[in-house]
């Protein structure tokens, strides 16, 4: 894995658990990210995002007050003076598929299971740097494309709900695309 200088990166750690917040802040500082802000919930995070330029958000999914899903949806909406393109790493101990899919569908950039290690967090940051995903907008979604690679000549089923609703069936959409 290539080594990157993260000296100029600013990060925001959002977690309602002070102990976990401290661990992630210390890991980020150990990775040479010198400007690390903290927030206890989504409301504090939005205040920080409006006040300070932030390059990366590392946030818990399950929090009191404004939870991770609500915060992520607010960030991706671009409302409240927040950059909707900011990379977001969701950190959660609850890694059942339903929760990961929910975070993905809300617009997360990367997912990381607790407990967090310096190596795993660094690997997610490197993934954001080396393999940035383009952002897409549909009727019900704005965020990183779920596909890791863009393939202009993609032929296959469309699985997004809005694709089904717009065309009536996934097969119809693919038939129209091939015509």
Image (spheres, grey):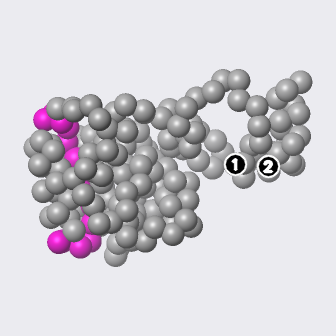
Q: Residue furthest bottom?
A: 64
Residue at image point 45% right, 51% down: 108
Residue at image point 27% right, 31% down: 2
Q: Image quadrant of residue 45?
A: bottom left
Quarter placement of the N terminus: top left
Residue 5, position as x, y percentages in the image: 17, 32
Residue at image point 34% right, 33% down: 129
Q: In the image, is residue 16 above or below residue 135?
A: below
Residue at image point 31% right, 44% down: 123
Q: Which residue is mark 1?
A: 160
Are the two marked residues, 1 and 2, in contact with CB atoms closer than 8 angstroms?
yes
Q: Image quadrant of residue 13?
A: bottom left
Residue 78, position as x, y percentages in the image: 43, 44
Q: CA distance from mark 1 to mark 2?
A: 7 Å
Q: Which mark is residue 74?
A: none
Quarter placement of the C terminus: top right
Q: Is residue 98 visible?
A: yes
Q: Which residue is mark 2?
A: 164
Q: In the image, is residue 174 above or below residue 74?
A: above
Q: Tell me the crowding category of disc 1: few under 14, some 14 to 19, or many 20 or more residues within 10 angstroms, Cα based.
A: few
Q: Is residue 11 magenta?
A: yes
Residue 20, position as x, y percentages in the image: 22, 68
Q: Image quadrant of residue 32?
A: top left
- Of 148 and 139, nearer the camera is 148
| Region in magenta | 6-19
- Of 50 and 62, nearer the camera is 62
Say what secondary structure mark 1 lies in.
Answer: loop
């Amino acid at each position: 894995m290539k080594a990157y200088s993260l000296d100029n990166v600013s990060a925001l750690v959002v977690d309602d658990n002070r102990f976990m917040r401290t661990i992630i802040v210390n890991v980020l500082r150990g990775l040479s990210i010198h400007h690390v802000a903290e927030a206890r919930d989504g409301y504090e995070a939005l205040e920080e995002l409006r006040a300070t330029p932030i390059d990366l958000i590392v946030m818990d999914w399950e929090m009191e007050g404004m939870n991770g899903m609500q915060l992520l949806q607010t960030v991706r909406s671009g409302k409240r003076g927040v950059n909707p393109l900011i990379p977001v790493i969701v950190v959660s101990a609850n890694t059942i598929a339903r929760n990961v899919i929910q975070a993905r569908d809300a617009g997360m950039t990367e997912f990381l299971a607790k407990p967090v290690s310096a190596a795993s967090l660094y690997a997610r940051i490197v993934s954001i740097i080396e393999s940035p995903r383009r952002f897409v907008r549909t009727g019900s979604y704005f965020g990183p494309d779920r596909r890791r690679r863009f393939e202009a000549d993609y032929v296959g089923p469309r699985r997004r709900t809005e694709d089904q609703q717009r065309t009536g069936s996934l097969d119809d959409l693919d038939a129209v695309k091939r015509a």
